[in-house]
Image: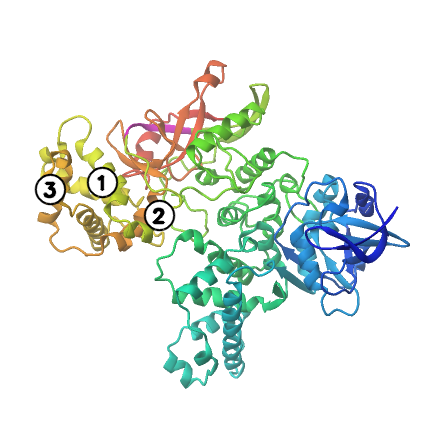
Amino acid sequence: MKISWSCTADSCDRNAQSTLDIPQPYKHITTLRPSLQPTQIRILLLHPGTGRDPVYGSLWRGDIEDAPRYEALSYRWQDVPAHKDCRTVPHIHIVDGLDMKLFPISKSLVEALFTIRENQSQDRALWIDQISINQTDEDEKSGQVPNMGRIYSEAKKTLIWLGNPVEQDDIALRIITSFGAFRRQLETLLDEQDTEYSPQMRLGLVHALSLESPEKLRSRRITTFSTLPAIGDTETQAILAFYQKSWFTRMWPLQEVVLSKDKEVHCGDVTLDWKDVIFFATWFMHRHAELAVNPELTIGIKAVNYTNFYAQTYESGFDLLPMLRATRAYTATDSRDKVFALVNMIDFSKATGVGTTNQHSTTGRGVPTALKANYRKEPVAVCTDLAEYLIESRKDLGFLSLQDHVDRATWLVDDRFTWSLRHQRRLMKATEARNILSPTWVPCWNRNEMSAPIWLPEANAENFNAIGDSLAGETFAKTMTCMHQRSTARILEVRGVEIGRLKRRSVVNVDENDDISAAAGQGKRHWGWVLSAIETELSNGSQKYSFTKSNDTQKTELLRKLAVTFTAGRVRGGSILDLSNPTALKEHIDGFCGLILELTNSEIYSSSVVYTPLKDFREYIQNHHPQLPNNGTQSDYTHALFEACRNRFLFVTDNGMMGLGPCCATIGDKICLLRGCRVPFLLRKDWKMFKRNLKGAHKLVGECYLYGAMTGELASRVASSRILETFVLI
């Protein structure tokens, strides 16, 4: 049967354009047969066309070394709509000799092809994952994904498709284009100098010049500065909306940008230089850092800066664990791609711990076999294999600090996942009903971190050492397999010592979506969790108004403990607070006191008997700290508090120690020091597994900050007994 039609992105309109054979359902899949070998590549030769005429092309396949010079397409992935007839979904026409077949693709991809083929007079060679890789063949996907790093690095250009413009995009595009001319004039200024700069140094100098005063720029004869458009509220919202396009926070585009040599951005029929996009993003964040914007609106523009940083600093590869943390905010349709999309950017010699050797077998590219792309693995298996690799290669358990969850980590392939407590518990039950057990010690990389880690994986980060030297011997950790509820689960056996149990806790405080600027704007009611936590500790749970009965030494020590614990022992920017430095400690405590005075600056806290502990606490601060900063909710201390307390609460142990713990901890949880972990961890005994003869079975609740135990103070005492307990993490 023959039919006349023309193709659009949404449907196939049956108007006279060309006459083609209608394929049987799913006949298009045969176009990609036979499967590619790992050393082969498939290229789309896009034929010329105009407007929204049907898209035609043919496929070239062969060894990567013999491939024609091609361009790679980077775009926001969309699944092909479910269909039984290719005519009902967006598609292109694949010319195969004398035959012609319909090939269904996503709407975003067909829109990109409509734009890319404009003004081309001959075939254009393109590598596009949705066409160049058979998405229905798991074995071909597993063989081709490891090659994507090479594919993008060897492409003559990477074309970035952001989609067709939407409301206000024209404003953002106009501004970015204007700043592009500004950037090029600044680079011309550098070219006139005799000094040779590295690309990274050159980029830094251009940004430094762009932030100079108008008078300084005019003296340098930078004329384009005076023609830059003004940026008001309307322009700001348009810019933030533009950078919120989902492409900027996707996992695969991160790899594609980092490894590509030349990049060109397309938004509808507007073409931008990638350098202009990142130049303006950096300039905007510097010039408008004072804007009180919701952090959700700046995720995209911050991601552009992060992506550019990785692209500029990429040489042989990055360290695995820091990149796993850094990319948690990036999204992927398939949760396994949070791991598979990283391996091409990793230097696995850096992923090995200091003084150790990587004993894992590797593929030809140096990628450990355990991390090689394999889409026949379940997401939980991919993440568990990664965790086991980190243990073996790094010879420590630092990655456990990146685990944060509620009762049990749950994998979800849908990137629209929301981690409310109620939603997670519902998903947990559904997951266990499908017999998919995710170990509590295995981090879930498919969502953003709920709390900033207390132990930081970055190589140059300042870190605590709660285990000191006495427990820092060879890590005792091994993984095993056990059966639970008719399922196979991986368990981790570790050695350590219990140093206390959780006795008292405050309410859960800062939500993962809270913003420091928004909190200041919402007034004191937004800070109720701070006052509630302090009141809980002041009352002490055992005697009425215990703070009032304390002597001055006890009050001073309590004030110090609260001030330090609320920021997890760090200052704004992430550095560890030097408790031995009186000046730094006083400034830290003053910041805490200033915040408390501002929050309690109300008649309700001075007259009501309900708030007697806070009233006494406020009077003590006023008497002993008369000169305090007046920017309580906007101080450096408050920023450090917000970062540390996100999804954490204040707790007290049975031996009177104070700390910050994860929101999912409960009364009775054990605080333990584990070999291979530089910070304390909360563990919860699993009685169900204990009754099944799995002695020592515990769930990993998460890391915690414990005042007075972060520099090895307790480790030296408990290690002297030489009694180490075995904990089995399930």
Residue 498 lies in the magenta-colored region: yes
**Circle 1 residue:** 531
Residue 301 lies in the magenta-colored region: no
Element at badge 2?
Answer: helix
The kind of residue tagged 1 is Leu
Q: Position of residue 493 (x, y in %)?
A: 49, 27
Residue 445's place in the image compared with 461, above or below, is above
**Circle 2 residue:** 643
* Label 3 or label 1, whichever comes before in sequence order: 1
Work out how far the residue at label 2 is from the one at label 3, CA to CA, in angstroms. Answer: 29 Å
The kind of residue tagged 2 is Glu
Q: Which residues are magenta?
A: 496-504
**Circle 3 residue:** 606
Dot in front, 1 or 2: 1
Residue drawn at (79%, 68%) of the image:
122
244 and 719: which one is in front? 244
Identify the main secondary structure in magenta: strand
Residue 692's place in the image compared with 409, above or below, is above
